[in-house]
């Protein structure tokens, strides 16, 4: 969504709260190939008490530009065309059901309907919409209805991203919702109801996707930093040491795992929120969710995926946006780590502009 100019993008840039992730894909005859990738992590993202501190998105533009340039320089990235993501907490999106006469009538009616869902004046946002499918009109079966995916981004955010990319020497071709990029990279043409749980540094987003569109989006304010903080507090160690133990030991089920207790209560809360979101959707829609996909750096921790699956008691998979990407042979050993960490960036780079 939100195509700004007409051109084919090569880079997907995901600016998160704690890192900047860049993927470079090349499209060869309809097949994507991974040509490069790079990650910039914000140091000092937790303070001495293990509390989340600095946020990349709150830094001055010139510091974000510097971070992007550092990734490009050190990874020797050559492409300049960019698709960038806007984080979900900076956007507005929903599915609305409307009477359908024609596309022209729908286009005229949507701005009036959008005022009910977008909490700021419409002249302050860039808005886009897409018809998902025909819908049943229970009150009047002869009057057709359609489900419409509606999304909006504040203009101040789109202008900021254009300015950042321009100052980084890049050509911004489109700005896209973070969740839309995830859906493209992970789900492709699968139309069945699927849950995507994206575990970030400071929060976890739980998406219900059906017919290729986000139907429910729920942000839960616990992520990797909160788990690191819990480990640091329980063992009276530094956040840096806690992060190291988290990556090394994860949720391994053995007596030597000194961090397991500090982690499980928070992970169990993630599972609870996921289950509640699924149950609400299944009751509302009458559809059964077929699978759950996990993405984010924490998915790479030892036994995290199996633990989540056992607790949720559903089919759970690690989301793999690299499934449709040709990977250089020397990266095969770490493709799982790249896939989970760069899921949003990969979906962005796959976008046709």
Image: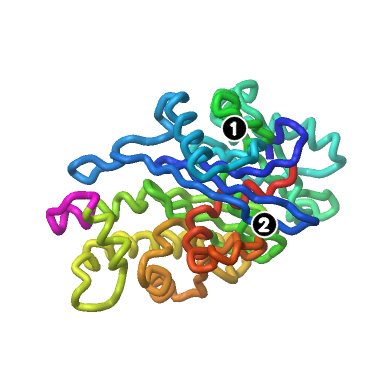
Quarter of the picture containing the N terminus is: top right
Residue at 56% from the left image edge and 24% from the top image edge: 167
- Total marks placed: 2
Find the residue positioned furthest to the bottom: 254
Which mark, by number, is residue 33?
Answer: 2
Q: CA distance from mark 2 to mark 1?
A: 30 Å
Q: Inspect the magenta stretch and tell me whether residue 232 lies in it.
A: yes
Label 2 with label 1: CB-CB less than 8 Å = no
Q: Position of residue 93 (x, y in %)?
A: 60, 41
* Helix, strand or loop status at disc 1: strand
Q: Position of residue 292 (x, y in %)?
A: 53, 67
Q: Position of residue 239 (x, y in %)?
A: 22, 49
Give the label, 2 or 1, closer to the camera.
Answer: 2
Q: Is residue 213 above or below residue 279?
A: above
Which region shows up in magenta?
230-240
Q: Name the residue nearer the viewer: 141 or 53.
A: 53
Can residue 29 be seen here?
Answer: yes
Decide if residue 203 is on the left or right side of residue 121.
Answer: left
Q: Which residue is mark 1?
A: 153
């Amino acid at each position: 969504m939100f195509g700004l100019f007409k051109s084919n993008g090569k880079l997907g840039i995901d600016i998160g709260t704690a890192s900047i992730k860049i993927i470079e894909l090349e499209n060869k005859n309809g097949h994507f190939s991974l040509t490069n990738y790079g990650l910039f992590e914000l140091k000092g993202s937790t303070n001495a008490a293990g509390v989340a501190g600095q946020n990349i998105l709150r830094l001055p533009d010139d510091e974000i530009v510097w971070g992007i340039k550092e990734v490009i320089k050190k990874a020797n990235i050559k492409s300049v065309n960019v698709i960038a993501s806007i984080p979900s907490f900076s956007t507005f999106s929903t599915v609305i059901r409307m009477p359908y006469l024609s596309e022209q009538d729908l286009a005229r009616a949507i701005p009036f309907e959008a005022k009910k869902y977008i909490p700021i004046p419409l002249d302050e946002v860039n808005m886009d919409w897409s018809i998902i499918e025909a819908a049943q009109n229970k009150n009047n079966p002869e009057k057709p209805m359609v489900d419409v995916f509606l999304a909006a981004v504040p203009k101040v955010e789109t202008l900021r991203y254009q300015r950042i990319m321009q100052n980084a020497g890049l050509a911004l071709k489109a700005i896209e919702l973070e969740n839309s990029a995830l859906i493209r990279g992970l789900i492709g043409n699968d139309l069945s109801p699927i849950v995507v749980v994206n575990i970030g540094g400071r929060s976890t987003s739980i998406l219900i996707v059906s017919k290729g569109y986000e139907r429910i989006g729920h942000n839960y304010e616990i992520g990797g930093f909160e788990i690191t903080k819990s480990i640091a507090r329980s063992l009276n160690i530094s956040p840096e040491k806690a992060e190291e133990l988290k990556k090394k030991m994860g949720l391994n089920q053995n007596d030597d795992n000194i961090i397991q207790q500090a982690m499980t209560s928070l992970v169990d809360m993630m599972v609870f929120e996921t289950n509640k979101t699924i149950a609400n959707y299944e009751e509302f829609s009458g559809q059964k969710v077929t699978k759950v996909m996990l993405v984010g750096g924490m998915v790479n921790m030892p036994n995290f995926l199996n633990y989540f699956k056992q607790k949720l008691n559903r089919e759970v998979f690690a989301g793999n946006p690299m499934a449709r990407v040709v990977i250089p042979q020397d990266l095969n050993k770490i493709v799982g780590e790249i896939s989970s960490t760069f899921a949003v960036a990969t979906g962005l780079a796959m976008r046709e502009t």
